[in-house]
Amino acid sequence: MMIRTMGRKRAIAAASMVAGLSLIVAGCSDSDETGDETSADPTTEATSSSGDSATGTATDRELVVWAGATTPINQTFNPYVPEVQHLALGGVYEPLFYYNKAGSGDPMPLLGESFEWNEDGTQLTITLREGVTWNDGEAFTADDVIYTFTEAPSAPGYITSAEATDDTTVVLTFDEPQYTNELSLLGLSWMVPEHVWTSLDEDPLTFPNLEPVGTGPYVITGISDANYTAEANPSYWGGEANVKNVRYIGVDNNQAAQDLLQTGQIDWVGMFIPEPQPILDAGLGYINTPQDPTVLYTCSNADLGCEGDQTDVAVRQALNLAIDRTAIKDKAFVGLTGTSSPTFALLGRDDKWISPDVEAESPQSPNVEEAQAILEEAGYTQGDDGFYGKDGDPIEMSLTSVDGWTDYNNAAQLIQEQAAEAGIKVTAATVSWNEFADGRTNGDFELIMGGVIGTSVPDPFQIYKDWFGGDSTTPAGTALEPGQWNFSRYDNDIVDEQIQVAASTVDEATKMDAYATIQEEITRDLPYIPIVINATQTFYNQTDYTGWPTEDDLYAFPPSWGAGAAGVVLHSLGGTE
């Protein structure tokens, strides 16, 4: 479970743990609990967060990272907009704690040192790190935390009050127990400076924030349509990073990024490469950590303005059964993916949360007969061309994926072919990243090949709340607000009620009953149709840099696009000379 009860004993243990988490930097680690600026020899041996030793030196060699986006790059470091550049989240702005979705155990203290829930989950007391400054020289204070939780654009609405009882203690109070929102509060809330955001003369949701003021290990130095750059923050509370200069570059497709990687022009990417052996032969490091569901987004809710045949649950159910996931796994993802669950629990990790009354796995082989039976029961008939329709209106749906995302593009083409076998007409096409982002944010789509952000803890609650909750969506035609992820426009009163039940309890049986009800609803309604657990491949330059996450030491989620993890990883790296 992700419930924490960090009393005095727990706080002392956390402080002791953090003191030993020196991560290959000059003097202090990303998790050093003192917050002072004591320096040390940059070649000092240090340990990663899992305790394995590593060495690294300060280096001026510029580390080049694939920004994970096509050009032109969206020029924004605003943490409240979906288009925010990756380094902003973790590298510039930090949460209070880092929750490692690739590992287990307690969260890593960042701007917070410890926290404690009261007995009924209606109050959360957070002890803050001392001696932290924003990169403009101003002190990080409890007032900044209170502002982030109560007045910032993504402030959680369920917080009834936030008070500082002293300079380093903030107490959050709720009307109802909020144990299950621990990750959202402590790990996904990016602390922002009150003195900057309250002085804006423009809408904070359109503010590009090109010179972001954060507490993280890096400071942005420039941005263009092609790239953006950052340098190590010399006043970082964890000590100045050994890697002094970082450049994130935009590349228009996977193949171009692969070519740059293989020729030594990129040092760190998180991308799909179907044949990684040539990359490994070139001396690069590699790790695959499947975590996140790949799905078909469906704009599912006609009552909220979605348009298209996918708004009929029978069509979604039939399409779900028509898909040959084994073929997609083998042909589009070359066997590197995991098996998806329609419950959105991660199989093998979250099995205890899966109700025995639903199927744990999505169907791996197609069932054309059952798919057609569902359509026929819903009043659809098969035309002379083999495709189903109703009242002379054939089922026709567009399926978009991002141009250059070869794995997703190939999967979409396979789904088009597989759907046709069941008499469902799906037309696959590619769009630019910006078209993809705008379409899903505004509900202007029918089907999208995309991903769901998996949870950082062994519990599917955050997916249920963020991706299926009615409070996390808007009518089609209206852009989702900051912190909203329900692109499908799904809105189910039963699901919403049980999300609140799960958020309000630490009783495992009560929570499991709530999840069972949620799973019954979402496995029937299928607003997101699960395909696979995506291969999450990471490639990195191990010749010039040391300290990367590895299978033996997964101290952080490895890909370069990981929100929050980027700051932890970059601050853990050092040069090899």
Image (tube, grey):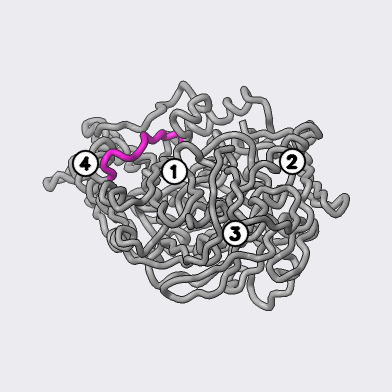
Q: Amino acid at mark 3?
A: Ala
- The answer to if 494 sits in the magenta stretch is no
Give the spatial CA distance, label 3 vs label 1. Answer: 29 Å
**SS state under label 2:** helix
Compared across the picture, whether 523 is left or right of 115 comes to left
Q: Residue at x 70, y 69 (%)?
A: 197
The residue sitting at 49% across, 71% down in the picture is 228
Residue holding disc 1: 292
Image marks 4 and 3: residues in contact by CB distance under 8 Å: no
Span highlighted in magenta in the image: 333-344
Amino acid carrying label 4: it is Thr
Residue found at the far bottom of this picture: 201
Q: Is residue 34 left or right of residue 65?
A: right
Residue position marked by numbered label 4 in the rendering: 381
What residue is at 70 percent from the left and 43 percent from the top? Answer: 19
Whether the residues at callouts 3 and 1 have beta carbons within 8 Å, the answer is no
Q: Say which residue label 2 marks.
A: 15
Q: What percent of the width, then of the height, locates residue 77?
A: 56, 67
C-beta proximity under 8 Å, tags 2 and 4: no
Give the foreground label among 4 and 3: 3
- Which of the two marks, 3 or 1, is nearer to us in this view? 3
**Residue 379 visible (yes or no):** no
